[in-house]
Amino acid sequence: MTTITTDKKQAWYSGRWAQIFLHVIAWVTLFSLPYLLRPSPDQRHAPDPDEHLWQIHYIANAFVLTLFFYLNAGVLIPKLIYRKKYLQFSGILLFFFAALVYSRRLFIHGFIAHKQFELRPTILFTFFTLLFILACSTAWKMIRDKMNADKLASEKENENLKTELSLLRSQVSPHFMFNVLNNMVALARKQSDQLEPSLIKLSSLMRYMLYEADEDKVPLDKETDYLQSYIDLQQQRFGAKVQVNVVMDLPEQGYEIEPMLLIPFVENAFKHGTGLIPDARIDIELRARQGLLQFTVMNKYNAEYTEIKDKTSGIGLTNVKRRLNLLYKDNHQLLISKKEGWFVVSLQLHLH
């Protein structure tokens, strides 16, 4: 099955172990701030006998804030914010805020007897610290959820594109097979000597369609061999009634192309460029140079003849346009025109 690659290579920082490493670095830095920011012994007026107690208290608060960070990201936001339970969320925030303020009061009264507990600066410091952790936790959770949602949407789009391409290709193949089998019936009725070589060509075409055409890309020379076999079968069918001119100019350097991409243009030319058309003629030219494929198919048509369309009319060109847009996007240019009794299809394709 054809696969479409739409996801870019995953950034190193989005990996699981990279995320764990970055979080560990962030928390170690936060826990180390009392040691990193403390004044040197030469800058102190007097040693603080309770310094180690303050450091223990800071580390304990840091662990509580770490717990709050992941509790908010993993539980509060998904269970409360996303479900619009703002009152319960506010209640939990007030609980954490009060617990931090009260824990500082208990710490000072229980371990720092000579220091008086000051409520106002404690409230301000705790409020802004908790607000900072809350903002970081919420931003991290929102960004992570957005990245996961974008990744899921990209995967769904990729699956939809693969499914659509599979359907488009499956519509091309039966249409082509019906035409070729009609050719075989015509040769059998004429008891033509060309029936056996035609069956051999048909066998090679079916082998290509069943095995080669299921790949993402095929060598350009295989695709052109497929086109040439189809053209040979059609020439055997129409004989001298239709003049067919074919030029296949391929470089020595190998290129790859989406399989079954060019056949609808040729098939369309034989379908609509034969019949009640004086001096029917089909010109097919394919050239590939410097990564650019130029493919032109021209057939005469009778403007006065109104063709009776069946249910499959127009499916080939419509499908190939859609496939070009899906697979090559801005790397192709397709021009279809009618001028001076000629129906002209011109395709320029940047090969990868």
Image (cartoon, rainbow, N blue to C red):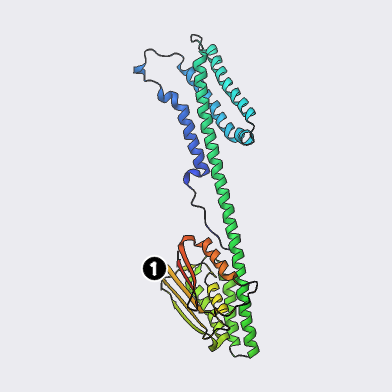
What residue do we see at 53% from left, 69% from top?
261
- Position above or below: 288 against 184: above
Visible residue check, residue 213? no
- Give the class, few, some or many, for how many residues have Cα within 10 Å of label 1's Cα (few <14, many ≥20): few
- Position above or below: 215 against 21: below
- Please state, as top left, top right, bottom left or bottom right, where the N terminus lies in the image: bottom right
Q: Secondary structure at mark 1?
A: loop
Expressed as whole percent of the image width and height from the top left, the position of residue 13 reads 48, 43
Visible residue check, residue 180? yes
Expressed as whole percent of the image width and height from the top left, the position of residue 256 reads 47, 68
What residue do we see at 37% from left, 15% from top?
44
Q: Residue furthest front?
A: 304
* Front-lying residue, 6 or 104: 6
Please count the marks in the image: 1
User: Which residue position is annotated with label 1?
Assistant: 290
- Position above or below: 280 against 52: below
What residue do we see at 60% from left, 87% from top?
195
What residue do we see at 62% from left, 30% from top?
86
- Please state, as top left, top right, bottom left or bottom right, where the C terminus lies in the image: bottom left
Expressed as whole percent of the image width and height from the top left, the position of residue 243 reads 50, 85
Apparent side of residue 112 relative to residue 99 in the rendered image (left or right): left
Q: Amino acid at mark 1?
A: Gln
* Front-lying residue, 255 or 44: 255
* Front-lying residue, 337 or 177: 337
